[in-house]
Amino acid sequence: MIQPGVPPILTPLLWLLIPLFLVLAPHAPHLPLWISLSWLAFALLRLYAEQTGRQLVGRVLKMVLALAGVAGVLFSYGTVIGPAGGVALLAFLSGAKLLETNTPRDRLGLLFVGCFLLVAHFLDEQSLMTAAYMAFAAPALVAGMIATQSPAATMKDARATLAFAARLMAQALPLALLIFLLFPRPQGPLWGLPQQAAARTGLSDQMSPGDISQLILSDELAFRAEFSGAQPTPQQLYWRGPVLWDYDGHTWRTATPVRAAMPEAAGLGNPARYSLTLEAHRQRWLPLLGLPTHLPELPNNPTRLGADLQWQARDAINQRLRYEVEAYPDYQLENVIQAVNGPPAPALRSRALALPVEGNPRARELARGWLEGAANDEAIVNQALTLFRAQPFFYTLNPPRLGASAVDDFLFSTRRGFCEHYASSFVFLMRAAGVPARVVTGYQGGERNPLGNYLIVRGRDAHAWAEVWLGGRGWVRVDPTAAVAPSRVERGIAAALPAGERPGGMISLEGAWLRPFGLGWDLINNQWNQWVLGYNQERQRQFLSRFNPMLGNWLGMVWALGLGASLLVLVVGISLWPRLAIIRRDPASREYQRFCRALARCRIPRGAAEAPEDYARRAAALRPDLGNDIKRITRLYLIARYGPEGGATPRDLRDAVAAFRPARRPAAKLESSQPT
Amino acid sequence: MASATLPTLPTLPWRKLGVESGPLRLTSRRLYILPTRSGLVFSLLLLGLLVGAINYGVSLVYLFTFWFVGLGVVAMLHTHRNLSGLVLQSGAAMPVFAGETACFKLRVANPSRLPRQRIGLRHAQGQGKFDDITGGGEMLLELPLPQLERGWKTPGQFAIHSEFPLGLFRCWTVLELDWGVLVYPRPAADTVPLPAADFDDGEGNAARGEGLEFDGLRVYQPGDASRRIAWKASARGGDKLLTKQFSSSSGKRLWLSWWQTQERDVESRLSRLTRWVLDAHTAGLAYGLKLPGRTLPPQTGETHLRQCLEALARHGQA
């Protein structure tokens, strides 16, 4: 990081500037330009001041700068607290503070601010790449902290400092993961979340010409779904989104939500179980496949299922959300036979037949002709599908512009369009022919990831289809697009489109050699979403109780966390324990140490700095009965250790020490002093 | 010249600290470790991040907050191991004059391969600079302490401490070693001429005594008698004052006696005698020292000077 050519006076400053820059760089796109520019200006100013040794900015100017920053952030964000304004203010002040960081403690404090900004960035972005980048920026911050402590060492060897910082972070990781897994996740925020003004993505709850074609061009992820058990067929993969009832001649929408209660419904066959991870689309509707047996609960966000099988939450989905559903892919909805004007409920029936007062006369006329000739509603539906199949209709994302009578233009002149044109025209025709019908938008299909065995559903899978109510069968799904381009349903959008129209992103993923990479990357991202980003209270309890049901509540987690963390700290501590190098003693010293220990047992320990001869003299005076042995062993030791070659050998010393077995106390009589 | 007292590092009040000798090893039983002020700031920061993580429910904020928590814990272990296992032994401190700073030297051996970094000594009256000790190496850590009074001075309790690597924790131990420094009395600043040699008439003009011969010139030092300044030579020589030096060639005996001093109180008398001893030594005279209860016969040389100064330093003390 720091080259040998850098003047040493700049080294501590660079150890501060570079880590801070690394942390702040990803913030830059989210910050006003003036903050980024002033940060860079402060950094350069400080570098210049350091090099020339001049104090460029006085105390008054510093105060003015700080106040100007607060005012600027207030002007830009309207607040200095909260994530966006707070981060902006901290970023600015971390630059202004650069002008007056002189002591190591100041620098350390500024690096703490860097730590804060590093973590705060995840409020804006949480992708795997961002996390990986920050995981590399963090050791740089830690290296900066080490540099505040040990400037001389870091100046000598920047690489060793970085390696040490990386080692510290690596040693911290097991503990971090343990706490991450076991720290009990609380439910919901501590205080109100600020409304984040961000564009909605994905399908909206209305459909105008061109809306879905824009979406089809996007590769943006809508959700992922994983089926446990039987995999549904492509024809079953209709992910239901907003159901649109009202048409004004241009836009389909649901002006007032359907308030009626859930009608009678029955599932057919076996239910399928799937878990769905929905990206934050900042809208209230939730995708659903089939007729659910029961609805999952969302944290802090009650949901309801409307009479039209549209599932809606109270609050917009602002965070990635995971839910599990058990549902019948095939089902009957409102299949009541008896009354002619019976279900759907009268109010809904009239709504399902309503059309604008005027416009599209040719379509109305065509529909009336079908009504007169047909035996029942099913025949009318078949008439319409036959029309799409027999006439030269084309599936394209670039349809010609339609005039005021959009349905007439499409049906009789342009005949080029995609799902929303077909669904819109079909429902128009049905209503004109007296068959209750509605437009359903959502997603169809999805890309199967064989590596993870789940479906990836993207913007390009957005789709619109129709539902008609047929006596005895209830609401039946009719996909007029399938009549024109069956491959749209069976093999996805890329297969249905003419070759020249396939969007770029799609082609790259369809390309044979890039496909495995793309899917592998998506798999990693999916796991990332599931296990890191989506690790919330529910998932935590579910995951932990798999190991032990005791871990299913917060008390169990706290116990496990305490025990696990203690154990882990112990293990890390022991592995870090400085291993005392074995001090190699020569054999003579070793034997002499044994002799000293033997004497110490007789309560005559050797003093710390006592020379062998002094010790021998003292010991002999205290224990006259051992005097000769003590003197002999000491002499042997001194000769073996320091004497000329060929004198006493360590072996002589060893034999003498081995024979030296003094009694603890001097014997009363000299004769009875036998070796014990 | 009272130096500001530094805050000392605390110990457990029920743990009695005794004077220790010999090499002693820093074990966990001796080492204390607590967060520094920066460490407390860091923990507050982590608390703030945790509150943010809970409020916004962002899993990555949890993950990185806990990573920094782990970093703090690992830093604590590293700080502790930076001191653990070191072997301390007191070194000799060179005698100083009162008013000077004595430099206590602590011999720190590192019996492990792990290099130890940024280890410092601290005392209420001063602290040493931080030093590194290589793996298996040894280092003399210096503790400079200003000495105000003469005599045998023990520094009392001091601490060996380290905040490496991150400055979040401080590990330390407080100890008292059986070491000390001999502080000679402060030499009197003003100049009173040396007393006459014993055969002289007592007028104090030892320099012109028959037994002394002119030996050369040297640069003036504070305390040199003004009579000995070589004014003419100084005027020729430039901006430095020069002092005439004499040597005793005939072995005349100069006695520096407690009872010859003009001062009345003990410390001033000792200061005066110290000044005389130094002057006599620089002049190359053979001198003897007479103190109440102690007499050192006239002699020359470094050893004699040391003995005289020690006698002066220890005067009246055990």
Image: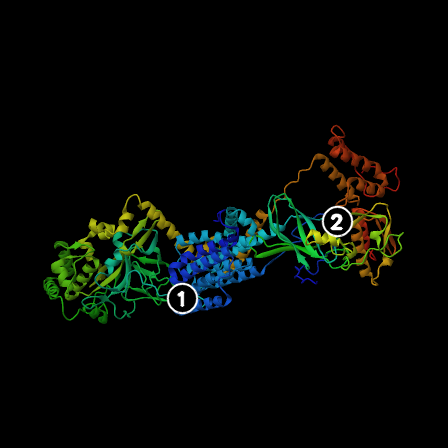
Q: In front here: B207 or A525?
A: B207
Q: Is residue B82 left or right of residue A607?
A: left
Q: Is residue B209 left or right of residue A286?
A: right
Amino acid type, residue under disc 1 in the picture: Asn
From the viewer's side, name the closer residue of A266 and A465.
A465
**Camera-side residue of B73 and A469:** B73
Q: Which residue is mark 2?
A: B217
SS type, badge 1: loop
* Residue A399 vertical position relative to residue A642 in the rendered view, above or below: below
Chain containing mark 2: B
A565 left or right, relative to A195? right
At x 44%, y 68%, the residue is A68
Q: Quadrant of residue B152?
A: bottom right
The answer to whether residue A142 is seen in the rendering is no
What sort of colour scheme is used for the picture?
Answer: rainbow
Q: Position of residue B175 (x, y in %)?
A: 70, 55
Task: Evaluate whether label 2 is on the same chain as label 1.
Answer: no
Q: Secondary structure at mark 2?
A: strand
Q: Which residue is mark 1?
A: A300
Q: Which quarter of the image is occupied by the C terminus of chain B? A: bottom right
Q: Nearer the viewer, residue B161 or B289?
A: B289
